[in-house]
């Protein structure tokens, strides 16, 4: 039984804990109406809308209660599907986390509240699109005021626990070019297949100013995001259909997929991070030219990356998964040599299995090489 006195200072929390649906609808209906995405076309409109959103969020997303639960987090814990529908229809921020670091959707999946998880999944894509459209004019205007630039970011991983982690961990060099309110990013990291890193020569284009062909046969609105796969010679509009309401089949499929894997929450601790100049073999500070710019190279050390996990009922634990994969590799040792022979030796694979079993690979020291440009 919930103690109502913990929520008397917040009308929405109190209505939820009392399951007073009439009061909850009345409180929400009294909130200001947000403009639709097509109604926001200028930076002034965008700023005004964001101010309005902040005022509404101060009511429907409050977390000044035990457990730092938003009203939606509380709804999940109380297993109240009706309140979940009312709150999601009002535009609550489902991604806000409680004191344990989990969102309402993650809590719903982990507690097998499929009805609430479905309600959240049905609403969050349209809500995300509304937020994007609301902020886009401000983003485009702000980007246009930033000085044009070109930069490169190179990163790779190292670990004291697994010395050869750099051979299987991701690494890449991002090349970023900004002109006006348009942005281009070139990269090669595409994904993973087991311990193999998948590479793809691809470019992301953010067209803040939109695009129109010379003959007028093709036009893209401001804020379009294109993905160019150079080898395949394919162009994809990443935001195509983003504002469409998903079908019930699509929502059910997404919830089912989330229920098949355990939850993970990555975290980055930069409290001990430090930048030190990168030295060449002569112990001199390393310099690089990026276009016509001269820059110094720095190493960023002691950035700790951690992952917090939570088991979804009915899903294998990490230990069970690792044990299952190890058994499969032992049964098909020939396939193992074919899959990982070009990445790790047999001894290194054995060390990796031992480290994963011991749970000692929860955090790694991440090392980045940064080029800081100077005028």
Image (cartoon, rainbow, N blue to C red):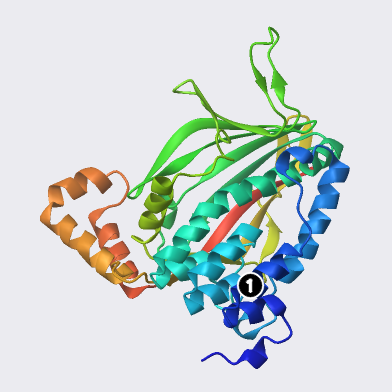
In the displayed structure, does residue 204 sit left or right of residue 375? Answer: left
What number of labels is visible?
1
| Residue in the picture at 49% in, 44% down | 246
Q: Which residue is mark 1?
A: 22
- Graded by Cα atoms within 10 Å as few (under 14), some (14 to 19) or many (20 or more), the crowding at tag 1 reads few
Furthest-front residue in view? Answer: 22
What secondary structure is found at the residue carrying circle 1? helix
Q: Nearer the viewer, residue 213 or 370?
A: 213
Residue nearest the observer in this picture, 58 or 82: 82
Q: Position of residue 37 (x, y in %)?
A: 72, 42
Side (left or right) of 309 relative to 97: left
In the rendered view, tell whether residue 241 sits above or below residue 102. above
Q: Is residue 358 visible?
A: yes
- Tell me what residue is drawn at x 52 percent, y 59 percent: 120
Q: Quadrant of residue 95?
A: bottom right
Query: Between residues 213 and 364, which one lies in front from this camera angle?
Result: 213
The residue under the point 64% across, 55% down is 299
The answer to whether any part of residue 168 appears in the image is no
């Amino acid at each position: 039984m919930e103690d109502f006195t913990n929520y008397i200072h917040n009308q929405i929390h109190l209505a939820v804990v009392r399951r007073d649906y009439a009061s909850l609808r009345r409180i929400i209906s009294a909130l200001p109406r947000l403009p639709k995405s097509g109604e926001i076309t200028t930076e002034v409109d965008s700023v005004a809308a964001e101010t309005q959103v902040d005022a509404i969020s101060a009511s429907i997303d409050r977390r000044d209660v035990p457990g730092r639960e938003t009203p939606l987090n509380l709804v999940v814990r109380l297993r109240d599907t009706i309140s979940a529908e009312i709150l999601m229809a009002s535009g609550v921020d489902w991604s806000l986390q409680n004191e344990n670091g989990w969102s309402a959707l993650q809590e719903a999946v982990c507690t097998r509240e499929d009805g609430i998880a479905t309600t959240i999944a049905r609403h969050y894509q349209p809500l995300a699109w509304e937020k994007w459209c609301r902020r886009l004019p401000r983003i485009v205007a702000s980007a246009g005021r930033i000085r044009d630039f070109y930069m490169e970011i190179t990163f790779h991983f190292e670990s004291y626990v697994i010395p050869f982690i750099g051979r299987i961990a991701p690494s890449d060099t991002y090349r970023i070019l900004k002109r006006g309110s348009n942005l281009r990013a070139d990269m090669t990291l595409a994904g993973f297949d087991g311990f193999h890193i998948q590479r793809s020569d691809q470019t992301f284009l953010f067209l803040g100013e939109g695009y129109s062909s010379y003959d007028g046969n093709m036009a893209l609105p401001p804020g379009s995001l294109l993905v160019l796969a150079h080898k395949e010679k394919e162009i994809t509009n990443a935001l195509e259909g983003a504002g469409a309401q998903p079908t019930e089949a699509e929502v059910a499929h997404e919830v089912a997929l989330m229920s098949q894997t355990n939850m993970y929450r990555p975290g980055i601790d930069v409290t001990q991070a430090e930048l030190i100049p990168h030295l060449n073999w002569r112990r001199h500070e390393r310099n690089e030219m990026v276009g016509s710019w001269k820059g110094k190279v720095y190493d960023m050390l002691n950035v700790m990356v951690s992952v917090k996990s939570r088991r979804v009922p009915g899903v294998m634990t990490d230990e069970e998964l690792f044990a299952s994969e190890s058994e499969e590799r032992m049964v098909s040792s020939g396939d193992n040599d074919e899959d990982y022979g070009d990445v790790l030796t047999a001894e290194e694979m054995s060390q990796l299995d031992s480290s994963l079993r011991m749970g000692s690979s929860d955090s790694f020291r991440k090392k980045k090489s940064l080029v800081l440009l100077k005028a």
